[in-house]
Image (spheres, grey):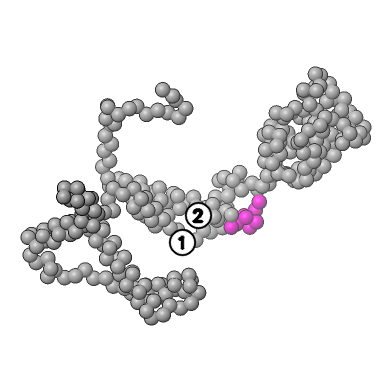
């Protein structure tokens, strides 16, 4: 018998019924006029009904029937009632998921600049304030001959001899050492060259004259003899060429600024008290630290 009672007590349905009975008893005792209080009003506008129908049509590729539309309206009302009752019971409190979603919605509202009109003067000023953000990289077409330091004890001398042979018309395919690195690049951006050979190598390459073999240039792999066949220098485009990109960056920055400004103003209305951690709590361990 006692085992049966324990099993029954663990049933969630029993807990729900007991809570409902307790709430009913509470309102019966302390809220005599509660049942006569005016009901909360839920107004489903024609615009909301139209939106429900439009959502149905997008997902089902057809108009809803009358019964389907009525069911969607009933579902909307059901959701609204449950939402209001949950909020009234404080079920939104101390729920990290709800807090995060509410924060995101408010941030979206604060950063809304849909009505902002960015003039060309404002965009030009923004472009000049941070030109590197919009600058087009230098591009080069080049050939390189690799000189392997592991195979050549006198690396510098060997590189200079190879350089002389190349400038005398030697075949670059027949000179130098074997490597898995690309031998040629066609109008490749400086960042791609830097990815393969390192930043310093890429900076030197884009400053080389065209038409002659130069070097040696050094990378983490060794020495390289390089000829630049063509180069397009880095440049800052005119606003008309990249207006959409500048506008996108401009609005993103203004949204962030407006959101931060709104937060600072809201923050002034709060007193924030942060307690020190309890002394019994273990000290935080920084990244990479072991005990």
Q: Quadrant of the C terminus?
A: top left
Circles 1 and 2: CB distance less than 8 Å?
Answer: no
Q: Is residue 44 visible?
A: yes
Disc 1 from disc 2: Cα separation: 9 Å
Q: Secondary structure at mark 2?
A: helix
Callout 1 crowding tier (Cα within 10 Å): few <14, some 14–19, many ≥20: few
- From the image, give the main secondary structure of the stretch colored magenta: helix
> Which residue is found at the position 16% from the left and 47% from the top?
2
**Does the stretch in magenta take in 72?**
no
Q: Nearer the viewer, residue 55 or 165?
A: 55
Q: Nearer the viewer, residue 97 or 263?
A: 97
> Which residue is found at the position 50% from the left and 52% from the top?
252
Where residue 92 sits: x, y (%)? 28, 53
Q: Is residue 216 visible?
A: no
Q: Is residue 167 left or right of residue 252?
A: right
* Marker disc for residue 104: none
Magenta part of the protein: which range?
237-244
Q: Nearer the viewer, residue 103 or 217?
A: 103
Q: Secondary structure at mark 1?
A: loop
Q: Residue furthest top?
A: 153
Instruction: Give the residue at mark 1.
Output: 114
Callout 2 crowding tier (Cα within 10 Å): few <14, some 14–19, many ≥20: some
Q: Quadrant of residue 143?
A: top right
Where residue 134 sits: x, y (%)? 61, 48
* Marker disc for residue 251: 2
Q: Quadrant of residue 33?
A: bottom left
**Does the stretch in magenta take in 242?**
yes
Q: Is residue 87 left or right of residue 135?
A: left
Where residue 119 sits: x, y (%)? 53, 59
């Amino acid at each position: 018998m006692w085992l049966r009672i324990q099993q029954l007590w663990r049933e969630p349905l029993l807990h729900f019924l007991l809570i409902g009975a307790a709430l009913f008893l509470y309102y019966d005792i302390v809220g005599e006029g509660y049942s006569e209080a005016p009901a909360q009003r839920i107004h489903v506008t024609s615009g909301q009904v139209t939106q429900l129908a439009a959502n149905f049509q997008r997902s089902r590729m057809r108009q809803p029937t009358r019964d389907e539309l009525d069911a969607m309206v009933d579902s909307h009302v059901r959701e609204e009632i449950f939402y209001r009752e949950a909020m009234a019971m404080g079920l939104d409190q101390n729920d990290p998921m709800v807090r995060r979603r509410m924060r995101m919605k408010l941030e979206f509202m604060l950063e809304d600049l849909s009505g902002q009109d960015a003039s060309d003067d404002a965009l030009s000023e923004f472009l000049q304030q941070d030109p590197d953000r919009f600058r087009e990289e230098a591009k080069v077409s080049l050939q390189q001959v690799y000189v392997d330091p592991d195979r050549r004890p006198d690396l510098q001398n060997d590189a200079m001899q190879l350089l002389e042979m190349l400038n005398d018309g030697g075949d670059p395919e027949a000179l130098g050492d074997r490597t898995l690195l690309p031998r040629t690049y066609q109008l490749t951006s400086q960042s791609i060259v830097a990815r393969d050979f390192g930043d310093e190598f890429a900076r030197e390459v884009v400053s080389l004259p065209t038409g002659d073999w130069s070097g040696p240039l050094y990378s983490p792999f060794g020495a390289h003899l390089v000829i630049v066949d063509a180069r397009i220098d880095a440049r800052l485009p005119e606003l008309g060429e990249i207006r959409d990109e500048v506008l996108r960056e401009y609005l993103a920055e203004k949204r962030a600024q407006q959101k931060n400004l709104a937060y600072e103003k809201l923050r002034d209305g709060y007193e924030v008290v942060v307690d020190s951690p309890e002394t019994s709590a273990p000290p935080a361990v920084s990244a990479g630290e072991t005990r």
